[in-house]
Amino acid sequence: MPITMFSTLKSTAGTVLPNLLLGAALLGTGLLSPVQSRAADEPHVVRDLYYGEALYQFFQQNYYTAAVHILTARERDLLKHHDAEAQLLLGGIYLSYGLHDDAERLFTVLLDEKQTPAVHDRAWFYLGKIRYYKGLYAEADAALAQVGDHLDPALTEELQTLKANLLMAREKYTEAAHSLLELAEDGDENQAWFARFNLGVALIRAGRSDGGVLVLDRVGQLRSDDEYLKALRDKANLALGYRLLKQDPVRARGYLRRVRLNGPFSNKALLGMGWVALEQQQYKQALLPWDELSRRDRVDVAVFESLLAKGYAQELLQAYPQAM
């Protein structure tokens, strides 16, 4: 049994949820979805006990346990009917833990074997996704071009989003905006919000700032109890705040105030609030968010930046002893 893989998975177990949240905010989808969408939407007859147990653990969000069940079952040759599906699920778990190389090897093996068109399409899709994460944009594009007509419907919109992100990565912002328009208006509701965020960014980078700001402002006001969407809302407001920091600091402050104080983007928002005040020559006000930020965990670059910024503001206030 591959003990090293178990230990690698276990060592990263504490970071899987932050990684998922970050991935969702950047790309617009969750990572653990090779079989999730289909199993949720269609009756799925399970003919291998170990695969059924792995699915159960997966849907309970016990991803490490699900991976162990699959690895154990494959080692003992207990997946007579669901081996390819189990490998797709395992590859998705590897992706969520950031084990991109292991996931890539697994999907490549699947493609070397004679598989059903549905397995073929999903494997190419995830290979494209991995290569996108690695910054191998031409290779990602080539992989996604191999996806045929048998991709799970729930992954089709994600495929469109991924293709749009590839266009943006290659600075083809106008093309990316066109490809995102349909998703932003007619896609699955959750997926549509991520498409709207990406559309806003694409429009701004294509030189259509007014339209991009309007789209991002819409995302910045969405209401949801979903943690991924809350993070996306914060990210949109953060982007707007920094975008307008110099040209319209009053509006920038309004956007930054929308960002939650304890969300994943709160540190950057506090840093931005200080810069907004500094832009308006309100040096004492600039110190308030920076004081709060400077007391936070110093693993974040924004916290270190706040320490430098505090010294700068204190120097402007001629508080030289404090600035030292």
Image (cartoon, rainbow, N blue to C red):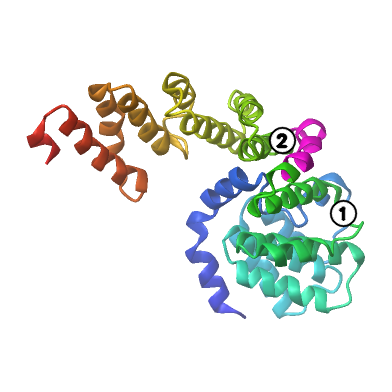
Question: Please, what secondary structure does the residue beneath circle 1 have?
Answer: loop
Task: Tell me residue 201's x, y (percent).
Answer: 62, 38
Say which residue appears at 78% left-offset and 66% top-offset.
142
Residue at the farthest left position: 321
199 displayed left or right of 123 = left
At mark 2, the secondary structure is helix
Q: Quarter of the image for the C terminus: give it.
A: top left
**Dot 2 crowding, Cα within 10 Å, few <14, some 14–19, many 20+:** some
Residue 120 versus residue 196 in the image, above or below? below
Residue at 57% x, 74% y is 5
Residue 289 appears in the rendering: yes
Which circle marks residue 58 in the picture?
none
Q: Nearer the viewer, residue 213 or 154?
A: 213
Whether 83 is among the magenta residues is: no
Residue 143 lies, in percent from the top left, at: 77, 65
Residue 246: give x, y in percent of width and height. 42, 29
Could you tell me what secondary structure mostly forms the magenta stretch?
A: helix
Q: Magenta span covers which residues? A: 176-190
Assess disc 1: are there few (<14), some (14-19) or many (≥20) residues with their C-alpha within 10 Å of its C-alpha: few
Callout 2, which amino acid? Asn
- Residue 104 lies in what quarter of the image? bottom right
Residue 189 quadrant: top right
Disc 1 and disc 2: Cα gap in Å? Answer: 24 Å
Q: Which residue is mark 2?
A: 190
Q: Residue 276's spot in the image, x, y percent?
A: 37, 27
Residue type indicated by callout 1: His
Mark toward the start of the polypeptide (1 vs 2): 1
Residue 44 marker: 1
